[in-house]
Amino acid sequence: MNLAEYRGVWVFLEQQDGRIAPVSLELLGAGRKLADKRGVPLSGVLIGDQVRELAADAFQYGADVVYLYDDPIFRDYRTESYMRAVIACVQKHKPEILLYGATSTGKDLASAVATDLETGLTADTTLLDVDQETGLLEASRPAFGGNIMATILCKKHRPQMATVRPKVMKALPPDPNRSGQIVEERIHLREEDIRTKVLKIVRETSKKVRLDEADIIVAGGKGLGSKEGFQLIHRFAEAIGATVGASRDAVEAGWIDHQHQVGQTGVTVTPKLYFAIGISGAIQHLVGMQNSGLIIAINKDPDAPIFQACHYGLVGDAFEIVPLLIEALQAESDKEVQYGGKV
């Protein structure tokens, strides 16, 4: 493989219901930094049916070029059809870096493309950088149960690929004055050539915890001691109108469902306010909440790593501190009622 033939940073632009997925816009922000550092263009790969107008959104968020596959055969996501389009585009235009959102679609597509192209793929990346001279993508992620950060390189194959979780990177502010080049691409693909068929799409109807959309999160860890002790988190969250989160230890102990887990193997969150109560602060958890607006930690251990990542820290017993906070909030609420909403 002649690595010198490969140039440019690409982002797979995942789209659904007539809009580009937020994680793809976030990756355009990260990709813009990588492309500028290398002095190469930033491109997006947009696949779907009647999605041409979405290219304008990609340009506003940093893309210079959009490779467009717009055909009824791409109306619904199927691994085989999308994979063939991405592979054809890569073989024709030869990017050095290709990024995907770590969604169910992105992870499925990225692994299929990596297998057929016989190149490397770093999954669930939390940090991205590139060597300005060599073009080597430095994709970092927690390893060994979240105890260390590993930086993974793909030295001998191209494109270098990585998946990145939603909310890890930050999208650029949209610039409505930006424009770019649309390159229309086609592949010869018939419906009968594809082995899978989409018969029906059933929308999820059950109520889900939307940690990634919460403005305030109260998260608890193993320091709460038991499932009964974890109820303190629920009471505090209810008192301040917050969403309940948890560390991996609390989830694995069976104190709360996995959908509440924050961290590398859970959900990445960016609330305005994050309470970490009884959470030691392992790397696995920190990468999932470190971009929160304000982090307040409560822990009995003054040497807990969480105190190195928080804005404010309280050293003490959560079972003494949290009830005092709830009591103070209730007192303020009573004042508001007494004085007609003004304190």
Image: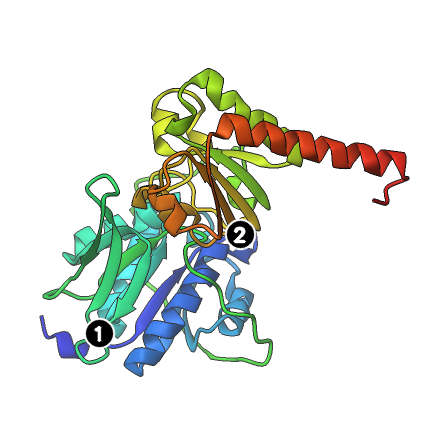
Q: Residue at x 50, y 56 (%)?
A: 22
The foreground one among 303 and 206 is 303
Horizontal relation, residue 34 to residue 290: left or right = left
Horizontal relation, residue 189 to residue 338: left or right = left
Q: Are marks 2 and 1 in contact (CB under 8 Å)?
A: no
**Residue 294 badge:** 2
**Residue 326 badge:** none
- Image x and y of residue 168, in percent: 41, 55
Where 186 sits versus 176, above or below?
above
Where 236 sits versus 101, above or below?
above
Q: Work out how far the residue at label 2 is from the one at label 1, CA to CA, in angstroms.
A: 32 Å
- Image x and y of residue 164, in percent: 35, 54
Q: Is residue 120 visible?
A: yes
- Image x and y of residue 120, in percent: 17, 56
Q: Amino acid at mark 2?
A: Leu
Residue 156: image quadrant is bottom left
In the picture as drawn, the residue positioned furthest to the top comes out as 228
Q: Which residue is mark 1?
A: 131
Q: SS class of the residue under badge 2?
A: strand
Quarter of the figure that contains the N terminus: bottom left
Q: SS class of the residue under badge 1?
A: loop
Residue 239: image quadrant is top right
Q: Residue at x 48, y 53 (%)?
A: 311
Residue 134: image quadrant is bottom left
The foreground one among 323 and 5 is 323
Q: Residue at x 19, y 70 (%)?
A: 136
